Image (spheres, rainbow, N blue to C red):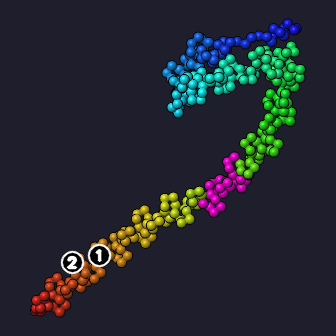
Amino acid sequence: MVGFLKKLFSSKSLLPEQQYDDRGFNVYGIHKNGTKYDDHGYDVRGFGENGKTRNRKYYDDNGFDAKGIHLTGKKYIAGYDCFGYDSLGFNKEGWNREGFYKDGFSKDNYDKDGFNRKGINKYGFNKEGIHKNGTRLDNKGFNVHGFNKDGLDRDGYNRGGFNQMGYNRAGFHEDGYNRAGYDKDGYSREGYNKKGYNREGFTVAGIDIEGYDQAGFNKKGYDREGFNREGYDKQGYNRNGKTQEGFNAQGYNELGYDKDGYNKQGFNGEGYNREGYDQSGFNKEGYDKEGYNRSGFDSIGLDREGFNSDGYDRQGYNRAGERIH
């Protein structure tokens, strides 16, 4: 058994160039197929020969294009980007952005799966799931995945992430609520947060934080734009700037007339002003303010000098003072 365990736990780790990621690349950017491109034509950074990613983008997740130029315009200096990493993602000390060295191990000497250079994790298991004691369980009864025979991990949580009381590490029960009765978003079983608002932002009474109901009106009956349910503001105008009677703020309807029927020039639809005269100064009977028609005669047929169309005045005299015979 001792010889078996010695053999089992003394296997050497593969060299960095022999270790490949999920896409088949080693830390030097070489694919299993022996080229810098995978079988789909993309390199370790995800760029094809056309300079685009699989999503047909020109920048990778770190903001660099295929030539190593950052979207801010900053370029590689002496082989390192503006964040201090080379084209393969390692800094001058040999660590990548996730904190792993080129051989795949962190500064704590564990790889991304939690195993050290001897292939043992901190609990004493190798990658095959065998503990140093020669079984699949450690001395406390936990397997390589950290679960005991009851299906609980070292902290007392099952594979679903809940303890025997039904709560997860974040303090939420399997039904989604914590001990205070709120879910991860802060809402109670009734659907309201600690301030009394539901997911739509309304109280039990149906009012939001700004004092508006679900229809969008406040207690005075006006919406956020200042209009009531009938569509009119406090001055009595609708969104088109008209009153219920159809008049605008200047007091005119869509035809351009006020409530009395006159336009801005002071004339009604028939062309007469409030005094009853048209733009030429004549009333419906055809007379001006002095009582003369367009021909210059009054209602009894006399002109402004007192003569009729035949040239005689009321007494029968013409302009020369001669009397009618």
Closer to the camera, 271 or 113? Answer: 113
In the drawing, what numbered circle is on residue 295? 2
Between the C-alphas of marks 2 and 1, the distance is 13 Å
Q: From where the camera sits, is residue 46 visible?
A: no
Please name the residue shown 82% across and 15% down the image.
130
The rendered magenta stretch, by its main secondary structure, is classed as loop
Q: Position of residue 88 (x, y in %)?
A: 60, 21
Q: Secondary structure at mark 2?
A: loop
The residue at the far top in this view is 3
Q: Is 152 placed above or below 4 here?
A: below
Return the x and y of residue 27 as percentages of the image width and height. 63, 17
Please name the amino acid that badge 2 sits on: Ser
In the image, 128: left or right of 280? right
Q: Position of residue 294 (x, y in %)?
A: 23, 76
Q: Is residue 63 magenta?
A: no
Q: Amino acid at mark 1?
A: Gly
Residue, x 76% and y 19% (percent of image)? 115
In the rendered structure, find residue 281 and report the number of the disc placed on it. 1
Question: Toward the viewer: 4 or 305?
Answer: 4
Residue for point 38% across, 76% down: 274
Camera-side residue: 246 or 19? 19
Q: Quadrant of residue 207?
A: bottom right
Q: Quadrant of the C terminus?
A: bottom left
Query: x%, y% of residue 51?
Result: 51, 23
**Residue closer to the observer: 316 or 5:** 5
- Range of magenta residues: 199-222
Earlier sequence position, callout 2 versus callout 1: 1
Q: Is residue 4 left or right of residue 277?
A: right
